[in-house]
Image (cartoon, helix red, strand yellow):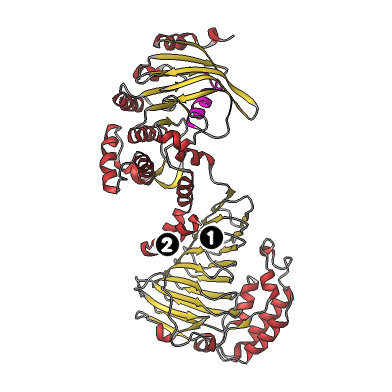
Amino acid sequence: MLEIKNLHAKVEDKSILNGINLNIKPGEIHAIMGKNGSGKSTLSNIITGKEGYEVTQGDIKYRNESITEWTPEKRSLHGIFMSFQYPVVMPGVNNTYFLKAALNAKRKYNGQKELDAAGFLKIIKEKLQDLKMDPSYLQRAVNDGFSGGEKKRNEILQMLTLEPSLSILDETDSGLDIDALKIISDGVNRYKSPKRSFLIITHYQRLLEYIEPDIVHVLIDGEIVKSGTKELALKLEEKGYGWLEK
Amino acid sequence: MNTSSYQSEFEKLLTRDYFSPKINPQRKNAFEEFLKKNLSKKAWDNLRFTNLSALKKNDFRISEVFDAPKKNFKYPEAVTADNYKIVFNNGHYQKQLTTLPKGIEIFTNLEYYDNRKNKVAQPTASPFDLLNTAFMDSGMSLVVEKNIEIKSPILLVFINTGKDQLMISPRIHVDIGKSSSISLIEHHIGLGSGNFSNSTTIFSLKENSHCKHIRLQKDSDQAINAGNIHLEQEKYSKYYLSHFGFGSSLGSIGVNSDLNGQGAECHLSGLCLTRNHQHLDTHILINHKSPNCISSQNFKTVLKDYSSGVFNGKVMVEKDAQKTDSNQSNKNILLSKNARMNSNPQLVINADDVKCSHGSSTGEIDQDALFYLRSRGIDYKTAKSILIHGFVSEIFDSADNLEIINYIKSDFDKWIEN
């Protein structure tokens, strides 16, 4: 699904990623753990195509195609999704309008008929229920006045709506209470399938109790220094990152 | 400034009989002050970022009765069809096209000034005010009785036509009686070229009266369009303005409100869209003169190409105006590196128990929001359009009239596309 080879990247002459190798197969859940500044968010931003990063070496392949030159929208249309660490607030942009525009962009790309308001509501209402979200969410402006938990649920709602093949969850657990964490993980777990892959980026082991990873990687200074099973996450929780640092 | 043709047109105007000659002293005072201040930036500090060369060049001639349309003139469609309507052509009131509800009387300005023995205070806040007083040549006055509620909006359509460089100076008085409410839609349509439309509208809002006012400025690309609004508000009166400045090459909206009676409210919203070398100004002054008054300003501009804009917003809170509640916001988006915006929000507070806020921001479109939308598969152009729509939507909504909002939105969509 996703194959990253020897990826080096910099932001304004500052080298952030220093040779990342990562191979996520269909159906796999990988977790990347690391301290602040280790390059976790840079990695997810580069996979989704955010501007301002320069890939200086290496390549990112998605379904065997190099995507480093693709626009963010092309990556999304091909099935790459990121749940943002800090979802953007968009005053004046209605949530329904936004979700419908996104879903219809995807349907159009896939040669499907675009949905009208009624068709869209039918699809979205079910997903709202799954995430225990009140339908009034749809009438609000995107993330405007949303609590931390509401914003994250809104991200997962988008994931369930757009049905990506590769979902990157960038610190989706930060700022969540235990109830919200459970609702979100339930949503993700129901969405899991042998054809879908996940990359979970997190500080803490907590989320991984709910969404069980196949492989855990430790990122330090822009390099994956260790990979292992979920026990690695428990060890990090217990011992911190010190023992892995050079 | 070349004043010779202002001078000769002024002499000509004094011989016309649209108004009583008894107000000529007031005209002369205004004209003298206009000449004295000479459109200099020193005299008009608010206009220091506004290029007035089109006014200085001045080869205008006054609008005459014969400039009104010929009999077979086909009127363009106004913003809505099924309303009470008052039509002006090149400033001249077209009585035969007017429909009005009961409880409202229309007077010619000759009659209106006569009824008041020509004792009407003349505004002097801007050179546009001075020019309007000196040259007022048309318009009419609306007088609403007390205790009248008129729900259906009254449409004031200003159609500017012709190839000549006309100086059109309508004067409108709107007097709203105690506990009455009306809704006005002022629609400026430019079919001519190079005219200078300079209207001054003076509102008198009696106790507990309400007025909703939508102003839609779609003058022609070569025109100069100034709208000068003055308000005297008695206690518990409420005034709401939604201004949409889309047209003209040089445009200006000025609002001066005196909140004279306690509990009066003045709520102003506005959206300007500028492109090419267009320049649009907004000048607001709200005087809180009594306790417990509320005012709000929410103005936005979206600028393209080499266009520019100015926002000057000032709130004055006088010593006795305790418990004033006032907020002021000006936000602007620059869609081009060559566009310029000057924003100047000001607060002068002389009372000690008030709640006042103000803020201003000007910048490019939010790159993080743009990426967010694109990361959901929405293409760059659509994403940009969604964000600009979101930015302006609260100003649309302030119009509180679905038909008008849809009309403005379709204009806006075309503007974004091109």
Label the magenta part by its dominant secondary structure.
helix
The label on residue B399 is 2
Position in image of residue B319 (x %, y %): 59, 60
Depth check: give the residue in front, B121 or A170.
Answer: A170
* Label 1: few (<14), some (14–19) or many (≥20) C-alpha neighbours in 10 Å: many
The label on residue B272 is 1
Magenta-span inclusion, residue A42: yes
Position in image of residue B97 (x %, y %): 40, 83
Which amino acid lies under the numbered mark 1 shown in the image of this protein? Cys
The label on residue B231 is none
Whichever of labels 1 and 2 marks the residue nearer the N terminus, that label is 1
Which amino acid lies under the numbered mark 2 shown in the image of this protein? Ala
Which residue: 43% across, 59% down? B409
Q: CA distance from mark 1 to mark 2?
A: 14 Å
User: Can the viewer see residue B146 in this picture?
Assistant: no
User: Can the viewer see residue B351 in this picture?
Assistant: yes
Question: Vertically, is A159 above or below B40?
Answer: above
* Label 2: few (<14), some (14–19) or many (≥20) C-alpha neighbours in 10 Å: many
Position in image of residue B65 (x %, y %): 53, 88
- A195 horizontally vs B382: left or right: left
Locate the N terminus of chain A by quadrant.
Answer: top left
